[in-house]
Amino acid sequence: MKVASRAGVFAIVVIVTTVLAACAGGPWHPRPTPSSSPSASEAPSVTLPVGTSTVQLDSGGQERTYLVHVPAGLSDPAPLVLMLHGGYGSGAQAERSYGWDPLSDQDHFIVAYPDGLDRAWNSGGGCCGKAARRNVDDVSFLTGVVTDIEARVPVDPARVYAAGMSNGAMMAYRLACDTDVFAAIGPVAGTIAPDTPCTSPDPVSVMAVHGTADTRVLYDGGTSTVGSAEIEARAAPELSAFWRGVNGCTDPATTTATPQVSIAAAACPDGRAVELVTVDGYGHEWPSTAGSQTPYGEPVYTGWDATNELWAFFAAHPTP
């Protein structure tokens, strides 16, 4: 049984500011338009300004915030991507770091950048920070963000996605475990802790990205220490196999995108897919053609861009 769905109700408080961002490139995956998209007449009127706004939202009696970027000329119901920052990050940092806004403007989809409590998400397994210690219901908060945006701009419910970095990637996995809201997720350098329940998730497309030299969330699984926290990781290939089982996929076929990047991709029923992108020798970073996107000082690789490729994967995999 799922603990949250798009039926949750959350109170809205205020919209504050407007900003804009910078640059990106082109994807590899095809971008079909789902036949199940609702018509514009069924969508709400646009009530968010073009560009980036800050929205305050009551969730569980606590005031939370998120940024939302709306492209110009939005009329038909659009895809929505939640981009979840890593530990010690923020929505504003995620907007600056990962290059989603230019793709949003180019391809007419909405991007939301929620803020974790005290810069962290309660993703399960004791990770991370105050959010975990207080057992904050971030699943309800994030599904509430989706519900709120759907009430304010025309969103296609078949094309709602979640991407995340590190602790945000762990939270994206948790959203897939605990809700039926998302058509696909894109965790980068994330995991599901071995003691985190994920017993009966709904089918969902998954494109996971992980570097083999990650010292914070270990690619091959095991325990790592990050400051005062211990991160228990399941091996990335094991997690990919788990989601193939959830989706009833075929065995994966592995291709080489670049000399350092291999993609194990499996086709699944109803047009879904599960892919594991392995970046050989790469650390706890967000792969980007612009270089390192988080200053951990680990190996940096610039030959493959996670933002472009995740968006292409999302666009090709709506909810059937």
Image (tube, rainbow, N blue to C red):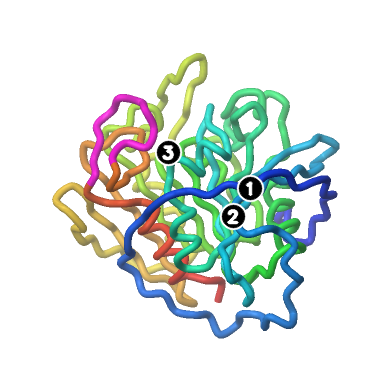
Q: Nearer the viewer, residue 307 or 92?
A: 92
- The residue indicated by pointer 2 is 51
What are the residue bounds of the magenta stretch?
A: 291-302
Going from N to C along the chain, the mark reached first, 1 or 2, is 1
Circle 1/circle 2 CB separation < 8 Å:
yes
CA separation in Å, label 3 and label 2: 38 Å
Query: Callout 1, which amino acid?
Result: Thr
CA separation in Å, label 1 and label 2: 6 Å
Instruction: Tell me what residue is drawn at x 67 percent, y 83 percent.
Output: 39
Magenta part, dominant SS: loop
Residue 288: % across, % down:
31, 46
Measured along the vertical axis of the image, is residue 109 above or below residue 214? below
Q: Quadrant of residue 29?
A: bottom left
Residue 189: % across, % down:
40, 40
Helix, strand or loop under label 1: loop
Circle 1/circle 3 CB separation < 8 Å:
no
Q: Image check: 29 left or right of 96?
A: left
Instruction: Tell me what residue is drawn at x 56 percent, y 62 percent.
Output: 71
Query: Callout 3, which amino acid?
Result: Arg
Going from N to C along the chain, the mark reached first, 3 or 2, is 2
- The residue indicated by pointer 1 is 18
